[in-house]
Amino acid sequence: MLQVERAISLKPYNTFAIDIVADYFVRIKSENELIEILNNPQYKALPRLILGTGSNVLLTAAFHGLVLKMEISGIEVIAENEQHVIVRVGAGQDWDNFVEYCVKQNWCGIENLSLIPGTVGACPVQNIGAYGVEVKDCIEKVEGIDCTTLKIFSLSNEDCQFGYRSSIFKKSMAGQYVITHVIFKLNKQLTPILSYGNIKDGIEKTGVVSLENIRKVIIDIRNSKLPDPKDVPNAGSFFKNPVIANIKAEKLKKKWPNIVLYPIDCETTKVSAAWLIDNAGLKGFTYKDAKIHDRQPLVLTNIGNASGQDILDLATIVLQKVKEKFDIELEMEVNKV
Ligand code: EPU
């Protein structure tokens, strides 16, 4: 029998540590439990909020609905050959524990995504990415339940419509699909991606190119600039790196020769949002208990008892200042609830 808790504070369940109350809260440990609750007449019409570790949400007001805390676990090899292994993983599995497990098994593909907070079920939603790798590069399929039909869905990589920090689960199917499992295809041979920033130098210092060393270097880089949500509540990058037209990028480059640009194709260029925020003079800027992180200004932090609204107000200040100075509109990466 599923246990639905009432009037529960979500403070321990979001990495911004925002203290708001949800009317109903339930832990989901299997597909059947998920179907049971979605079919329950008392709860099925309520607004729903799906939470993994709550590492990419900003809660701004009390939630008058049902929170589904996804806790389906398990890592199962469903096929393998000499080259690849296909692994089916429960949505509630901790992401970094899974990365660590793969590195220990010598399965290559997601080691650059070490230490990203969150669960396996959340990783396809925003197509997590770091250090030259996006999780879509290793996803075969995503499975879950359609909330209306209560039928199981299984989407291929292509069906998921992955983009930069985006997927079908964040767009047309937002709120409609609940992910229960992700199926990964990993490489048994070492195919390292060391092109991003100073990763190669880090690896050279450790001596050997191995999955273990790549993981170690990435963990060291992340720890050196990203705050641990356990110490300073935050949700990683708060904004996406904006994509602008090449003509605009050229103009900006003339005016600001140090601007950090990542050319995408013959029409567009990605701009470092961290650079924009930094050069709008906002590094370390504080509004009430909401603060822009000193070492990575893309990260907004809660340094005390910030409310979701305080964080949002700080984000609005950032949006305005960046727009004023560079005529670029930043877009939030974090999901506002
Ligand atoms: N920068 C500044 N000032 C600063 C800090 C950085 O100008 O104070 C500039 C630097 O020039 C640096 C550039 O920003 O070269 C890029 O910084 P970083 O390598 O940290 O990457 P990012 O583009 O800011 C993205 C992801 C991160 C991911 C890193 C590494 C997004 C929105 N963010 O950040 O993802 O870890 O690349 O691959 O794409 C996350 O999504 O939560 C996240 C942390």
Image (cartoon, rainbow, N blue to C red):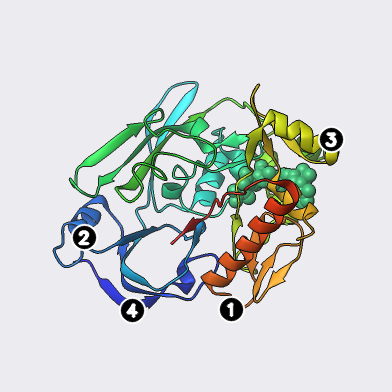
Q: Nearer the viewer, residue 81 or 143?
A: 143
Q: Which mark is residue 7?
A: 4
Marks 4/1: CA–CA distance: 20 Å
294 sits to left or right of 128:
right
Of the image marks 1 and 2, the number of the one nearer the N terminus: 2
Check disc 1 and report the residue beneath it.
305
CA–CA distance between discs 2 and 4? 18 Å
Q: CA distance from mark 3 to mark 2?
A: 57 Å
Q: Nearer the viewer, residue 163 or 86?
A: 163
Q: Label 3 vs label 1: CA separation?
A: 42 Å
**Circle 1: residue type:** Asn
Identify the residue at image location x=19%, y=43%. Answer: 151
Q: Amino acid at mark 3?
A: Lys
Q: Amino acid at mark 2?
A: Ile
In the rendered structure, which disc, 3 or 2, sits on the residue that comes first in sequence? 2
Measured along the vertical axis of the image, is residue 39 above or below residue 139?
A: below
Which residue is labeled 2 in the image?
37
The secondary structure type at the circle numbered 4 is: strand
State which quarter of the image contains the N terminus: bottom left
Q: Residue at x 49, y 34 (%)?
A: 136
Q: Secondary structure at mark 1?
A: loop
Q: Pointer 3: what residue?
A: 254
Quadrant in which the C terminus appears: bottom left
Label 2 crowd bin: few (<14), some (14–19), many (20+), radius 10 Å? some
Quarter holding residue 247: top right
The image quadrant of residue 20 is bottom left
- Secondary structure of the residue carrying numbered label 2: helix
